[in-house]
């Protein structure tokens, strides 16, 4: 990319196309002022802006390397830009403003009608972002996420929690265009990327951002490689992950361990036992919740230390749970309060957040002492020393914007989006200090720019236990593809989904379809969901356990394959689950597909994500001959195909000439 | 009010307070550009704005009487203002722009925290507008109008019709402040009046408005008087209205006339028979709809001409129905098409509007020939010559903004809000040309600035057949008070409500509570609702007919009283139904009351608008002693009172020293 001065303005040129065109008639830069009103309710944010000014910067003046932008000829500059073209297809536009009252920024990029864009973090509803705008603010993703469903309506009505298509735990002001460039804005302020217009994109940020980075590459894969280098590459998967499924059980010691034994005896390969409730539980109207006091609950798990050792001898790891908050009624709260580790309110008291019938203090990770305490006392002493091999590092999206003050002095509105990677970094450092990076596996749903630098594994958050379009099984695929294109290599989800509310219950069918998909993700993990007693569980019948056993065996069978791609993820940043077009750029039909993916480069997976279907329609990319795993039939790519939608035989294809063909051929023999 | 020049700006001063403060640090004027996207679905509009610029006009320069506003010192003026203080507390700010690309305008007025504002047309949810913003765009008001109700959810889901608190058939860019001033913007463009901020109001208009008018007066009543003079005063009620209720029946000739006879025989005083279906019907999924071909349907009413004459001899008038559209499958459509009376699309064809399973042409009333034809052929020949004494002049809110071209050359987006008074004026002229102004009674739901100049009676639109907060009985009162404060003297509603959808059915209780209120409005009129067969009707049982008879007798009994205030309405513009504070300025408790009203100046009505209640809480304004009509008990004002919530004895009070006391005392004897 290069900068080109033109009459009355300038352009940023990418090869032979104009990416940004700034003229006095049609400016690409705007600044302004707004006054936002952000109301939070349990991680759901109502955000309104009263826009006070939006000034087009119609005049520009060039001074050495600087571009001074002002409203008109005789008015003082409001923005000062510096464009630098760096090596390797990267360029950066640094932005300065000398007017501290400006808190709104807009940039317009040129687009063509047929162009597609992907990314903006982990998007659950839409992979291709064209035609919509995407507010970028980490939050609860919503329950239902579709204003036309009864479930969303009830969630909105009773919990302000229905959500919408753009709500996500992990937003990021970064997108990839089908024109082979990526754009990233360096700011953690609220942003809104608007892809509704046919001829331009308008990116809005609620501060003057530090800089905007552009990346170009001849192929999408190389673009992903560059982004992953920019935002962080992840370690290879731990060896123990390949041992089998991680069973999520939270019934206390006797219940959890006996069900685990039963699973093992039933032939299910188990890699880990994940007990969210290791620190205790509390009952709320939402269901069983955890007791947020991050230490071994000797009450609920009396022999946990010994149990963990015994498990390890059987090659099964124990996983726990932690969040960046401490509940007011726990034992750790007064200790952390005494040490001034919490964020404060305007009265100088601990700022409390309502998490749904209980309040917590927000551990202030901008305070070095908080980080050190949490790393040492919680992660290292209470978890790693106990023998814990991984955990869900939950939450990170709730940082309030009102009446909350942080040690680093930055406004909590600006820090809100920055919180997930900050929280991830505490986990990363604690693990690294013990030399356990790549050995311990924690997983997170909250994210933002740089998340993958600190977080070895995403989990897709709290889907509904159903097949719904905007909150069911299929959204997990969209989440994997959109986060993957920004260089997040590892993604997985709660098998069977999590959220069961307002009569929505997990069925055996939902559970089994989810298992069928999860076998082709980097990590298999079950979850009992928020209301275990009312929902279908993996051990509710022998047939389901047999099915789970088979699919875990397939997952295990693919260990050498997955290891290969895990190494590639580590060295090149390619995601394990890939959008089809990452390998089939020339087949434009693949650009809008968001419910199929390549698992590595060789296997194509098209998970069945609807209820009571007997057939499934799959698109096979052009330029390749595909082999249907279950009957070895060969199909020329570039066409749609109907295959049987059998439980235990998910639509699965491999490239005919793959060097892994023999491995794939054996899948059909696994029982 | 007066203009005052200050350093770096100017002020508009109202007595001792600053109404508008424009300085370079804190400008009150902004201009900009936006690109709206307006999607219409059967009168429900989804309106989105992509705001491209919002420029604060920080610099001002004075040149004779002109104020030139620009962005900064050296930049060209973007607005030119002229302020004129007229006689009688009126002033006007004329606005000019030489930049035709500007299509957004904002003005900020100063406000105090305790100030209230009312108006903005006929608002159905909130009388005091503080704390919310009000988009001003004539449309369907919505079904349910409350996102937390199932009915609204289903209406949104299936018909895009749920609506919200601000949706109204009759918006108007005019408000009255408790600081004794009113403000009106002369523009029919989309506007949004934002009263959310504590220290200022921000009024947004999607064009540069011609002018802004300010009115001041020492009392609210005098302010109403001035506004009614500005926007039009209405004739006195026709004599025949006082004869009783207007029965809405649409079952064809035999059914309608026999039910009318039955009503008369049951002792119900009847002023009119209103047959919406005089021109025929069609069946749709919404219910029975009318056949929009405005002429006597000899099929459905074979002897209508004779019937009307016979009725008249019995002192009962016949009312019909008309809308400003013609259905494509009617007989009049090809005639009007042949004469080029319709608005056209970009292909030069008749622009059709979907009204719910049938399409209509939009009669272009900016075309003089259309007006003349409609007046002569439809209103005069087809209606007045047939002996029709009144009609519902329905609709006016649906003017599409896309692909519709009008004879006057003005964009349909600008004409959209102007359409209701344009439609009203066709009715007014047709009636006036026959010398029947004040004798013929038509009523409308759609409105905008100047509506009352052409429309003798508002009707509150299509409430749900229930007691719901945002679409039930109580919203009619809010509609009467908010339209009343802008000088609309006459308001009434469909007794029992209109919209029955998704299992919402009119009960006997809803019907009777509505009757109890309607007796204290300028006109009583029943409506069978959209699904007559599934909803309670006035003649479903003898007790209900007896109750209706009694309440109509009370209405009739008050004829001299109502006539007095109808005369006052005509001469001074005071509404028949008045907000309490119009007469009790000193009692601040009255400023937020929107479910009680004064009927004339002497009677206080507090309609019971909830289900299954046995008591009703009433506020009686301070500074008056009130007499409870049903037991003559005297109560000092300035307090809340609990009274029995009996059907047939609505909470009703009169001023102890009223000259009408004897008339009121007789109410209790009416049976």
Image (spheres, coloured by chain):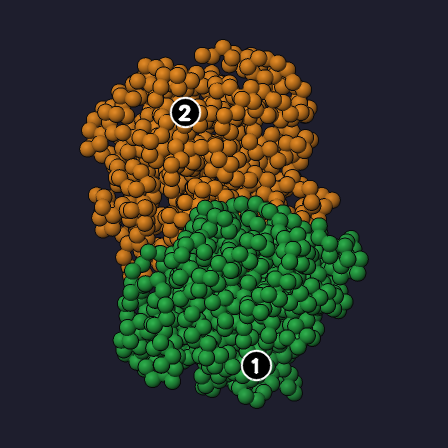
Chain colours: A orange, B green
Number of numbered labels in the structure image: 2
Question: Farthest residue toward the top?
Answer: A669
> Where on the picture, by quarter, is residue B360?
bottom right
Q: Are marks 1 and 2 on the same chain?
A: no
Is disc 1 placed on a helix, strand or loop? helix
Q: Position of residue A610 (x, y in %)?
A: 51, 29
Report the residue marked by disc 1: B229
Which residue is the extreme one toward the bottom? Answer: B87
**Apparent side of residue A168 relative to residue A86 in the rendered image (left or right):** left
Dot 2: within a 10 Å radius of its alpha carbon, few (fewer than 14), some, or many (20 or more) residues? some
Residue at the image position 31 percent from the left and 71 percent from the top: B630
Mark 2 — residue? A508
Q: For this view, does A513 lie left or right of residue A224? A: left
Query: In this image, B381 relative to A662: left or right?
Result: right
Q: Is residue A593 left or right of residue A282?
A: right
Rendering coords of residue A6 (x, y %): 74, 57
Q: Nearer the viewer, residue B505 or A601?
A: B505
Q: Which quadrant does the C terminus of chain B fall into?
A: bottom left
Which residue does the image show at 62% across and 28% down from the upper left? A583
Q: Can residue A68 be seen in this view?
A: no
Quick one: SS at disc 2? helix
What residue lies at 28% left-to-right and 33% top-to-bottom?
A277
- Residue at image point 37% right, 27% down: A536
């Amino acid at each position: 990319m290069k900068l080109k001065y033109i009459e009355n303005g300038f352009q940023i040129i990418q090869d032979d196309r104009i990416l940004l065109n700034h003229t006095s008639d049609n400016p690409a830069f705007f600044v302004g002022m707004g006054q936002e009103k952000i109301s939070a309710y349990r991680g759901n944010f109502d955000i309104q802006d009263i826009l006070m000014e939006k000034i087009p910067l119609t005049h520009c003046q060039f001074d050495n390397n600087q571009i001074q932008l002002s409203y008109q000829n005789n008015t003082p500059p409001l923005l000062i830009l510096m464009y630098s073209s760096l090596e390797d297809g990267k360029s950066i536009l640094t932005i300065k403003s000398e007017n501290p009252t400006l808190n709104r920024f807009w940039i317009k990029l040129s687009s063509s009608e047929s162009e597609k864009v992907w990314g903006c973090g982990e998007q659950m509803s839409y992979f291709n972002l064209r035609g919509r705008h995407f507010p970028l603010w980490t939050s609860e993703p919503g329950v239902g996420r579709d204003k036309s469903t009864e479930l969303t309506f009830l969630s909105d009505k009773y919990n302000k929690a229905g959500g919408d298509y753009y709500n996500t735990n992990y937003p990021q002001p970064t997108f990839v265009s089908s024109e082979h460039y990526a754009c990233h804005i360096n700011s953690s302020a609220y942003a809104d990327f608007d892809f509704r217009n046919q001829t331009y994109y308008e990116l809005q940020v609620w501060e003057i951002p530090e800089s905007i980075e552009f990346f170009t590459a001849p192929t999408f894969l190389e673009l992903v490689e560059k982004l992953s280098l920019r935002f962080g590459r992840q370690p290879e998967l731990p060896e123990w992950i390949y041992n089998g499924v991680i069973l999520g059980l939270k019934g206390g010691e006797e219940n959890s361990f006996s069900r685990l034994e039963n699973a093992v005896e039933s032939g299910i390969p188990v890699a880990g036992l994940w007990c969210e409730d290791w620190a205790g539980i509390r009952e709320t109207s939402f269901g069983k919740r955890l007791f947020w006091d991050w230490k071994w609950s000797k009450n609920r798990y009396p022999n946990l230390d010994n149990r963990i050792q015994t498990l390890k001898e059987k090659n099964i790891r124990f996983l726990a749970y932690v969040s960046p908050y401490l509940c007011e009624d726990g034992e750790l709260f007064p200790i952390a309060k005494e040490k001034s580790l919490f964020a404060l309110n305007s009265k100088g008291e601990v700022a409390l957040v309502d998490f749904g019938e209980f309040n917590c203090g927000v551990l202030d990770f901008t305070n070095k002492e908080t980080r050190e305490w949490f790393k040492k006392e919680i992660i290292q002493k209470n978890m790693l020393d106990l023998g814990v091999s991984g955990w869900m590092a939950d939450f990170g999206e709730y940082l309030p914007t009102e009446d909350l003050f942080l040690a680093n002095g930055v406004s909590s509105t600006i820090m809100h989006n920055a919180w997930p990677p900050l929280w991830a970094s505490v986990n990363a450092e604690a693990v690294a200090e013990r030399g356990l990076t790549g050995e311990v596996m924690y997983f997170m749903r909250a994210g933002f720019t740089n998340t993958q630098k600190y977080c070895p594994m995403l989990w897709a958050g709290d889907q509904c236990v159903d097949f719904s379009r905007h909150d069911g099984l299929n959204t997990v695929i969209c989440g994997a593809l959109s986060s993957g294109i920004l260089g997040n290599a590892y993604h997985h989800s709660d098998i069977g989904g999590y959220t069961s509310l307002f009569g929505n219950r997990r069925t055996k069918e939902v559970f089994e379809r989810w298992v069928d998909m999860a076998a082709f993700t980097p990590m298999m993990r079950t979850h009992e969901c928020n209301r275990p007693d009312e929902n279908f569980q993996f051990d509710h019948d022998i047939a389901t356990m047999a099915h789970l056993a088979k699919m875990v065996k397939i997952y295990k069978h693919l260990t050498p394959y997955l290891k290969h791609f895990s190494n590639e993820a580590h060295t090149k940043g390619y995601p394990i689950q890939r959008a089809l077009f990452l390998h089939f750029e020339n087949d434009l039909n693949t650009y809008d597909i968001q419910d199929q993916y390549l698992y590595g480069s060789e296997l194509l997976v098209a998970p069945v994500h609807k209820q009571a279907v007997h057939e499934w329609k799959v698109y096979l990319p052009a330029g390749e001959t595909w082999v249907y795993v279950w009957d070895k039939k060969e199909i020329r790519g570039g066409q749609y195909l109907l295959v049987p939608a059998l439980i235990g035989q998910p639509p699965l294809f491999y490239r005919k000439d793959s060097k892994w063909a023999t491995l794939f051929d054996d899948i059909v023999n696994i029982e």
